Amino acid sequence: MLYAILCYNDEAVTTSWTQEEDDAVMAKLQVVHDQLYADKLLGPSIRLMPTTTATTLRKSQDLVLDGPFAETKEQLLGFYIIDVANLEAALQVARDLGKANPGGAYELRPINIYQPGIEIK
Amino acid sequence: MSDPAWIDAALTSARPQAVGALLRYFRDLDTAEEAFQDACLRALKNWPVNGPPRDPAAWLIMVGRNSGIDAARRRSKQQALPSEDAISDLDDVEAPLAERLDGADYRDDILRLLFICCHPDLPAVQQVAVALRIVCGLSVAQIARAFLVGESAMEQRITRAKARIGQAKVAFETPGPAERAERLAAVAAVVYLIFNEGYSSTGEEADRKAPFAEEAIRLARLLLRLFPAEPEIMGLTALMLLQHARAPARFAPCGELILLEDQDRTLWNRALIAEGLALLDKALRHAAPGPYQVQAAIAALHDRAPRAQDTDWREIDALYATLERMTPSPVVTLNRAVAVSKVAGPQAALDMIAPLAQPLGGYFYFYGAKGGFLMQLGRGREAYEAFDRAIALAGTAAEAAHIRLHLDRLAKDAEASAR
């Protein structure tokens, strides 16, 4: 079963981290990532730039708006694609990631269609 | 979830919004700051036990407001404090308050809080100090260390600045569009001032002021979240990101300044550059150019060049010409002359800066650049004189050391040709 783990957190907090704090979180996460690769559970993972860089296209009127689609207290900051047996296993992965990177929430969403597309370097 | 580092980060990032709202409520900076301080103390006690609230800023505003009111009552009637239980149960009030805060109100709160630091009577350095203390929450000790003054002297300076601010009539009603735009422009200027205070320092001073650049970027991102469609705020944020990205390559291990063309570009922070370029790209779509966007575009051209010799100086020259039209100043012309020297040669650059000798007669960089152009033209004696003037005007040891390198090279060349 393919799941997307959508990562939500308060971006005002995460962008306030110093470079050292950010590096420390990424290093802790990398340990979890490496284990997930070894267990053949983790596909692509993506960290998004802050929502200040976002642009939204309202399709019906072709209206281009600055900023993210939804103004929320916590923002979508990235996502993982994982390949697991069931929801319980997906939750376990999310818990492992959460221990390395506390704060905010993960939303687990089963994936309907997955197309890897072109190879991106 | 409730580890101390997280709580600390949450308090820091909630600060501008919370102090801004408390200032609107109490209309007095000291009261607002004290109330916020008190709310933070309660958060440190309460959050590890009950878990952090969903909206830390709303929680702090609510608690700060109660505590400020209590303090006022105590002062007027010497009444007893309400018990801790009476204010610790905040779950019910938090939700509606958070909803109200999502409105436009708090945008103006933060803008007002930053705006009061831009008081025209305050010298630039004091604007920076006050903004760092009030808006960013840096301690007086931290700021004092950065400015190389004693803690009590800095405390006094900030107190005096705050007294001045207190006398000024700051409008507390919701500003109209024109006034909001005016405030935003003034606030952008003070944010860039904070950045430059950190960025333009060298040597040991650079270490002490290193957090300034990061604080300025944090404020700019905050402004951008509040005003997501302002191209100049995008430009300002992009400009600072694109410059700050080079920070890891700007100093030699001994603290000596390394010029852009000599920097190890593999040390540049690619993530910050990518973010800056994305913001600049967004800004340009608005087709409403301004000085911050133009300066960001110049920084982007430097950041995009894989090697110094790949720099698109022709485009940089054109951008400086645009900047000269927008904000005419001898310093902009001096910067343009560097681009001109690369495109049209040192003589053209020297001609360009000739009229600047009067307005920039006391400016270190003027004589540094002049000496550089003369050196390229092989006019060693005149170059030597210009560098000599530059050293006399150098503001820091690192600046002087840098010019001394040129002088040493001139001396060696002279020796070689004499032999």
Image (spheres, coloured by chain):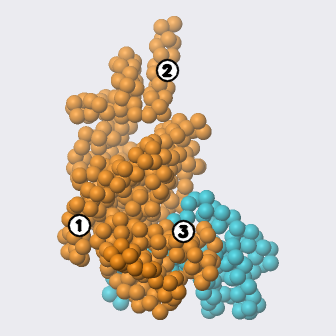
Chain colours: A cyan, B orange
**Label 3 close to label 2 by CB (< 8 Å):** no
- Label 1 Cα crowd, 10 Å radius (few <14 / some 14-19 / many 20+): some
Place of residue B214 in the rendered image (x, y in percent of width and height, measured from the top left): 48, 57
Q: Identify which amino acid the numbered label 3 is placed on.
A: Ala
Mark linked to residue B291 = none
- Label 2 Cα crowd, 10 Å radius (few <14 / some 14-19 / many 20+): few
Residue B378 position (above or below residue B277)? above
The earlier-in-sequence mark between 1 and 2 is 1
Q: Identify which amino acid the numbered label 2 is placed on.
A: Asp
| A105 sits left or right of B190 in the view | right
Could you tell me which residue is drawn at 47 percent across and 31 percent down?
Answer: B397
Mark linked to residue B9 = 3
Could you tell me which residue is drawn at 33 percent across and 41 percent down?
Answer: B335
Q: Between A97 and B151, which is closer to the camera in this rendering?
A: B151
Q: Which chain carries label 1?
A: B
Place of residue B83 in the rendered image (x, y in percent of width and height, measured from the top left): 50, 84
Could you tell me which residue is drawn at 45 percent across and 29 percent down?
Answer: B400
Residue B300 position (above or below residue B218)? above
| B285 sits left or right of B139 in the view | left
Residue denoted by label 1: B170
Mark linked to residue B408 = 2
Q: Identify which amino acid the numbered label 1 is placed on.
A: Val
Q: Is residue A52 visible?
A: no
Place of residue B266 in the rendered image (x, y in percent of width and height, measured from the top left): 59, 49
- The answer to whether dots 3 and 2 both sit on one chain is yes
Which quadrant of the figure has residue A117? bottom right
Name the secondary structure under disc 3.
helix
